[in-house]
């Protein structure tokens, strides 16, 4: 709290912000509490400091913020006190200290209760009715740590997650969406989780896979809070065993990305070639002749282009970092890029005319341009740029290429222990022979 002790007597003290000192004509508020008892001083100081804060905020034209600030500071003080109480409880020699700490805790909680009642315009909790009563009791429990707001620990959780920035933003949005319906984490139970799943499925008409994507960050968020003792350890994770909607085999087939057939590739090639979007033409050529992911392609540097192959180093997985032989149809595309690149630096991007987003991703805009082309040709949501990976995989399988060599070309993890753990991988010659079998009948 805001206490200062001098000559065995406590005073309430609050420094005035520099920009308002001239307005008040002093550097700080100070008032003697005429007591040497710290618990009594804390109880007396609360309303006085609250009044001072209100005067400061009124001087700034914002008289309401001080109440929130007081609750925040009280919550922080009570949390620190609880840690000290826990430590003192484990040491019998600190019996007197423990009693003092508990007295101080009770004093602060008493002031918090008085301030909440005052904010509601009453002097006794018995005068509260309806929503005012519910809000007052919930505010008291939140400030005193009996309840934990859903969003209280969100920023700490997100910082602790080893995920990409766009995934972190998605988690942030999903947890905020949940918190709008259920603002207090301490009140969330398995029944709440089931209600929310029903809400997402029925009221919001989300697909089963989308519902599951909303539950995942909530499950990991609750796990993180429990592991860090931010929620009562007696509570189980409400999202741990909750059942999410199952995806039927029929719906799964609908949602699955579908490979393009040879005639589809020919149609896309004709439409893209008719335009003057060099970056889109290049992206598409790399996609159908290497099976590389969209972002892998746009992250290629000049130094990644070798005489007979390209080196992919920006993959999502360890297996994704690989060498892919250059198909005969891809060679002129690469040569044209090398000749027109405005930078001679080995670190320059091969697809040079693209803009990175805030996360350093370079494929978003050109990916959208591809989406517009394929949509005009009548391809639905099952067909994406990623479908070109499935197309290349299909081409290799139909040409009789072994699964191990295909995995090395596409950057897939090998499923068997012999290949996945012990094999050094396919040779460049083996992969080149396989890539040479890809044929779409394009000139």
Image (cartoon, grey):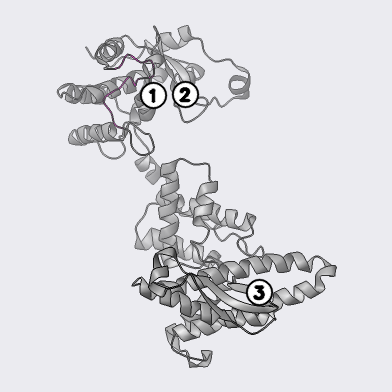
Question: Compared with residue 218, is residue 374 higher up or lower down, i.e. above or below?
Answer: above
Q: Quadrant of residue 432?
A: top left
**Which of pointers 2 and 1 lies earlier in the amino acid sequence?**
1
Residues packed near mark 2 inside 10 Å, few (<14), some (14 to 19) or many (20 plus): many
Residue underneath mark 2: 411
Residue underneath mark 1: 292
Residue at the right extreme? 93
Q: Position of residue 187 (x, y in %)?
A: 54, 69
Q: Position of residue 400 (x, y in %)?
A: 43, 15
Question: Compared with residue 109, is residue 381 higher up or lower down, i.e. above or below?
Answer: above
Q: Judging from the image, what secondary structure is the residue with disc 2 in?
A: loop
Residue at 37% from the left image edge and 29% from the top image edge? 295
Nearest to the observer: residue 41 or residue 248:
41
Q: Judging from the image, what secondary structure is the residue with disc 1 in?
A: loop
Q: Is residue 369 visible in this depiction of the protein?
A: yes
Residues packed near mark 1 inside 10 Å, few (<14), some (14 to 19) or many (20 plus): many
Q: Is residue 137 visible in this depiction of the protein?
A: no
Left or right for 351, reference 110: left
Question: Is mark 3 in CB contact (under 8 Å) with mark 1?
Answer: no
Q: Judging from the image, what secondary structure is the residue with disc 3 in?
A: strand
Question: Is mark 2 in CB contact (under 8 Å) with mark 1?
Answer: yes
Q: Which residues are magenta?
A: 343-355
Nearest to the observer: residue 9 or residue 96:
9
**Which of pointers 3 and 1 lies earlier in the amino acid sequence?**
3
Residue at 64% from the left image edge and 59% from the top image edge? 229
Residue underneath mark 3: 5
Q: Position of residue 114 (x, y in %)?
A: 53, 84
Residue at 47% from the left image edge and 23% from the top image edge? 411
- Camera-nearest label, 2 or 3: 3
Nearest to the observer: residue 48 or residue 32:
32
Decide whether residue 393 is among the magenta residues. no
**C-alpha separation, residue under disc 3 versus residue under disc 1:** 70 Å
């Amino acid at each position: 709290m805001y206490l200062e002790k001098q000559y065995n007597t406590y005073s309430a003290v609050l420094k005035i912000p520099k920009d308002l000192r001239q307005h008040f004509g002093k550097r700080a508020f100070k008032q003697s509490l005429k007591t040497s008892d710290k618990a009594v001083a804390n109880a007396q100081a609360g309303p006085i400091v609250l009044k001072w804060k209100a005067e400061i905020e009124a001087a700034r034209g914002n008289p309401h913020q001080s109440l929130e600030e007081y609750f925040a500071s009280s919550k922080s003080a009570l949390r620190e006190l609880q840690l000290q109480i826990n430590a003192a409880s484990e040491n019998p020699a600190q019996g007197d200290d423990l009693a003092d700490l508990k007295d101080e805790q009770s004093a602060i909680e008493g002031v918090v209760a008085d301030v909440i009642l005052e904010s509601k315009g009453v002097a006794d909790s018995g005068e509260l009715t309806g929503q005012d009563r519910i809000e007052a009791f919930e505010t008291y429990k939140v400030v005193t740590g009996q309840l934990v707001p859903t969003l209280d620990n969100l920023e700490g959780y997100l910082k602790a997650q080893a995920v990409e920035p766009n995934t972190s933003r998605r988690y942030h949005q999903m947890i905020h969406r949940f918190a709008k319906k259920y603002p207090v984490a301490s009140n969330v139970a398995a029944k709440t989780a089931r209600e929310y799943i029903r809400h997402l499925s029925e009221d919001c008409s989300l697909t089963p896979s989308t519902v599951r994507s909303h539950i995942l960050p909530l499950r990991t968020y609750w796990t993180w809070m429990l592991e860090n003792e931010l929620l009562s350890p007696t509570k189980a994770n409400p999202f741990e065993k909750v059942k999410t909607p199952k995806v039927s085999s029929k719906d799964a087939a609908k949602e699955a990305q579908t490979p393009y057939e040879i005639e589809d590739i020919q149609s896309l090639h004709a439409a893209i070639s008719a335009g003057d979007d060099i970056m889109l033409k290049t992206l598409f050529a790399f996609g159908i002749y290497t099976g590389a992911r969209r972002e892998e392609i746009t992250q290629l540097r000049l130094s990644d282009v070798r005489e007979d192959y390209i080196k992919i180093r920006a993959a999502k997985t360890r297996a994704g970092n690989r060498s892919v032989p250059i198909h005969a149809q891809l060679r002129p595309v690469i040569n044209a890029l090398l000749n027109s690149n405005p930078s001679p630096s080995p670190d320059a991007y091969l697809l040079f005319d693209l803009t990175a987003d805030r996360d350093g991703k370079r494929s978003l805009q050109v990916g959208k341009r591809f989406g517009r082309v394929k949509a005009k040709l009548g391809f639905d949501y099952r067909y994406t740029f990623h479908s070109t990976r499935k197309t290349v995989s299909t081409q290799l399988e139909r040409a009789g290429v072994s699964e191990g060599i295909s995995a090395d070309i596409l950057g897939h993890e090998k499923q068997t222990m012999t290949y996945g753990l012990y094999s050094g991988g396919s040779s460049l010659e083996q992969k080149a022979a396989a890539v040479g079998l890809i044929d779409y009948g394009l000139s």
